[in-house]
Image: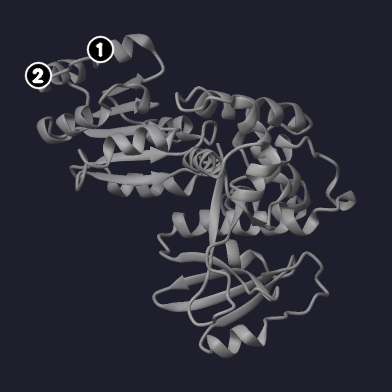
Amino acid sequence: MIPRILLNIIDSESLKGKAIIILGARQTGKTTLLQEYCKNKRNVLWLNGDEPEVIATFENASSERLKAIIGNNNTVIIDEAQRIKNIGIKLKLITDQIKNVQLFATGSSAFELANEINEPLTGRKWEHHLFPVSFEEMVQHHGLLKEIQLIEHRLVFGYYPEIITATGNERELLKQLSDSYLYKDILMWKQIKKPDKLIHLLQALAFQVGSEVSYHELGKQLSMDNQTVEHYIQLLEQSYVIFRLGAFSRNLRKELKKTRKIYFYDNGIRNAIISAFSAFELRQDKGALWENFLISERIKHTHNHNIYCNRYFWRTHDRQEIDYIEERDGKLFAYEFKWNTKSKAKFPKTFTRSYAETETQLITPKNFEDFIS
């Protein structure tokens, strides 16, 4: 098994009177992570929310009924908990009424699970995201040199656990993964009325990685209204397919203020959506793949190590731009990403004069390790 950083985190949080919630896309390894956690433990109750019997068991369950279900078990895992009606109340009852039990709940749809648990479990939970495997975790698994040698492969095929361990079958598995991943958790969602539009929207976003995205332009291209485009993008974000970066703007009149860029949590999923699996050295989108990889890996790193920050890009109306900005503890850090190691750092003077205390750095294949691990 590839060691996951989150395993040590949940181990340190267990048996402290709070539920541990693990959110993340399907196939990122949530079940495997908890199986590893439970490997040497006895009295573990594992319930799968995809099973009709489990759903029926929790129907109208009181605290006494929940005590009977749990019995003498001291570890309770509810997998795909979003399938269970009113799951937030049930988790609250277990946490409040059944002591000396460590409760875990996992979910692959934030728009279903997070909304259910936020109010009932206020102050009663630790919440974590499990992303696809990270560069940092692979370095810990088989060493830095080996992972650097594989970096062009990762830029095309990504870091899903099944893909990492399926040398030679990456294309077929990624296509299956992207289809089931999208259809099961998004297209079955009751508010999706035109699934073909969602697929076309995803494809359009995949081609625009690293570029500013206009909901209006996307709507015109796909014959959708702006509100529907925004709604679908929110669902895609809440199901861990994509994430948004907003524009940084404080001082300058000509700074863009309301635009956004959209990236994919995994390069492999992005490429599968548009069936783009050609070798990295032959590609025209090297810069976009490198940028998507670095920002998604940076998100994994900051989450795994509790680095709290705000994330942005920066651009002006006259097209001066910076790829990525972090705001940490009130200080700004600006980054430019270049695949060509001979590129020079070019941070616009308009920005550096206006935000003089900002630290700047160019990230290339020669120095990227410290940025994401």
Q: Which residue is mark 2?
A: 64
Q: Residue furthest right?
A: 282
Q: Residues within 10 Å of mark 2 (few under 14, many from 20)?
A: few
Residue 255: image location, x then y, percent: 58, 75
Q: Give x and y (percent) for residue 149.
A: 77, 54
Name the residue carrying label 1: 57
Earlier residue among tags 1 and 2: 1
Crowd class of label 1 (few under 14; some 14 to 19; many from 20; radius 10 Å): few
Q: Marks 1 and 2, Cα distance to the nearest angstrom?
A: 13 Å
Please tell me which residue lies in front, 101 or 334: 334
Q: Is residue 235 left or right of residue 136?
A: left
Compared to residue 325, the image places residue 264 above or below, namely above
Name the residue located 59 percent from the left edge and 78 percent from the top edge: 254
Asked if one can make out residue 264 in the rendered structure from this viewpoint, the answer is yes
Residue drawn at x 51%, y 70% as measured from the top left:
326
- Identify which amino acid the numbered label 1 is placed on: Thr
Across the whole image, how many numbered discs are drawn on residues?
2
Label 1 residue SS: helix
Find out whether the residues at labels 1 and 2 contact each other: C-beta distance under 8 Å: no
354 over 264 or under it: above or below: below
Where residue 273 appears, as percent x and y from the top left, is 70, 35
Determine the secondary structure under disc 2: helix
Q: Give the image quarter of residue 309.
A: bottom left
In the depicted structure, whether residue 96 falls above or below residue 361: above
